[in-house]
Amino acid sequence: MDSLNILIVGALVVVAVIVLFLVFKKKPKIEKPVIEQKEITPVVPRPEVVVAPKVTWKDRLTLGLEKSRSEVWGKIGQLFSSGTPSLDEIEEILYTADIPTGLVQELLAKLEKEGKGKSSDEIQKLVYGFMKEKMGPIQENIHQDVFTFDSSVKKTRVFMIVGVNGAGKTTTIGKLSTKLKSQGAKVIVGACDTFRAAAVDQLQVWCDRAGVDMVRAKDGADPSGVAYDTVAKAFSEGYDYCLIDTAGRLHTNQNLMDELTKTKRVMSKINADAPQEVLLVLDAITGQNALKQAQEFNKALQLTGIIFTKCDGSAKAGSAVGIVDHLKVPITYIGVGESVDDLQLFDLELYLKTLVGLEAT
Ligand SMILES: Nc1nc2c(ncn2[C@@H]2O[C@H](COP(=O)(O)OP(=O)(O)O)[C@@H](O)[C@H]2O)c(=O)[nH]1
Ligand SMILES: [Mg+2]
């Protein structure tokens, strides 16, 4: 019985082995199917790519000076197009644009002498030539190399920015530091408008956005102290540009003007050349009063340049010619709006051609 069992089990094992062998041998190899991975793109309508047209500086300037061109400078030629106009009419237009009396009379005399029978375009060229003659020699005095950053020049340039309240000092410093930083310059800003906490915060926002350093006043510090600390840091740490913001003040307030003189003086204790530039921010809207302001600031601080802001929205942008002619101080920058790109180095030819409506090249 036992041997029969063993036999049966043995036979079963043999049969099982044979079956298993056959099963595994015959089983076709099942290859994993290769599933092609196709990218599934959802059918979503593509939004139209709108590329904002690049607004060039020439376009910005043309738009900014539109009022001055259409209401004043471009109008002179038009008046000549239908015969010789009454010079009184031109005189009145020039006075509304806040052109000083002496200059108005000079231009009228020129128009009277040379304008007869000329076309509108020829008159515009004559006006352009007159303005260029007045401003050209003074504009030559701009220290061009100072305003364009050159990384091979290892120098710290200090700009002191002055002007009455609301002229655009802080905004201009914000724009300038953004520009200089994007050119690769190391920039530091001194927040010396210690009268208003909001003014310091306003500057801080610009500096943070531009990624430049700023020195704030310690509690109770006076403006010249902040200027001193900023300039000292600028020179000891090798900054390329040091921009000093100051509190807006009326040019008629002697105490405040004295304080500005002191601020300027303390900077020169750190470096005899500092500040290399004392720039007056003038708001074009101020018109005739701008000249008075400029004279007072120049007397107290010996200005090296003028930053002419808010030329947009005012028909008085041409008052630049009177200011430059009177003061013998060049315009270094011109502002035609609130964005960084609305401030540019002043280019006399482009400015004058745009102002009188001649095609600028
Ligand atoms: N339209 C226009 N506004 C400007 C220009 N420059 C500055 N502003 C504005 O003028 C106002 C006063 O500027 P701000 O820099 O605070 O003057 P600050 O008191 O001299 O420091 C701000 O609202 C500026 O945005 C410009 O060129 N055009
Ligand atoms: Mg300010």
Image (spheres, rainbow, N blue to C red):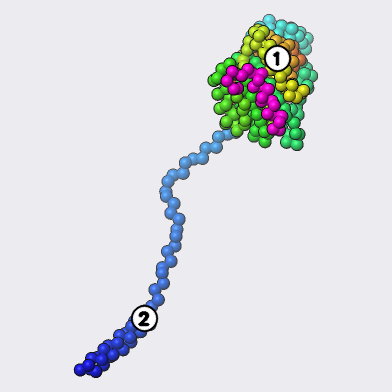
Query: CB of mark 2 within 8 Å of CB of mark 1?
Result: no
Q: Residue at x 44, y 51 (%)?
A: 41
| Image quadrant in which you'd find residue 180 | top right
| Image quadrant in which you'd find residue 20 | bottom left
- Residue 219 lies, in percent from the top left, at 57, 20
Q: Residue at x 65, y 20 (%)?
A: 225
In the foreground, 166 or 221: 221
Q: Residue at x 44, y 60 (%)?
A: 37
Can I make out residue 157 in this image?
Answer: yes
SS type, badge 1? helix
- Kindly identify which numbered label has been placed on residue 261: 1
- Residue 129 lies, in percent from the top left, at 76, 18
In the foreground, 24 or 217: 217
Q: Main secondary structure of the magenta part?
A: helix
Of callouts 2 and 1, the N-terminal one? 2
Q: Residues within 10 Å of mark 1 (few under 14, many from 20)?
A: some
Residue type (three-letter) at the residue carrying disc 1 = Thr
Residue type (three-letter) at the residue carrying disc 2 = Phe
Left or right of 72 in this view: 43: left
- Residue 4 lies, in percent from the top left, at 23, 94
SS type, badge 2? helix
Q: Residue at x 33, y 87 (%)?
A: 18
Which of pointers 2 and 1 indicates the residue nearer the eye?
1
Instruction: Identify whether 270 is placed above or below 30.
Output: above
How far is disc 2 from disc 1 in space, using C-alphas? 103 Å
**Quadrant assignment for the C terminus:** top right
Left or right of 333 in this view: 207: left
Q: Which residue is mark 2?
A: 24
* Total numbered labels: 2
Looking at this rendering, what residue extends furthest in the top direction?
88
Magenta region? 217-238
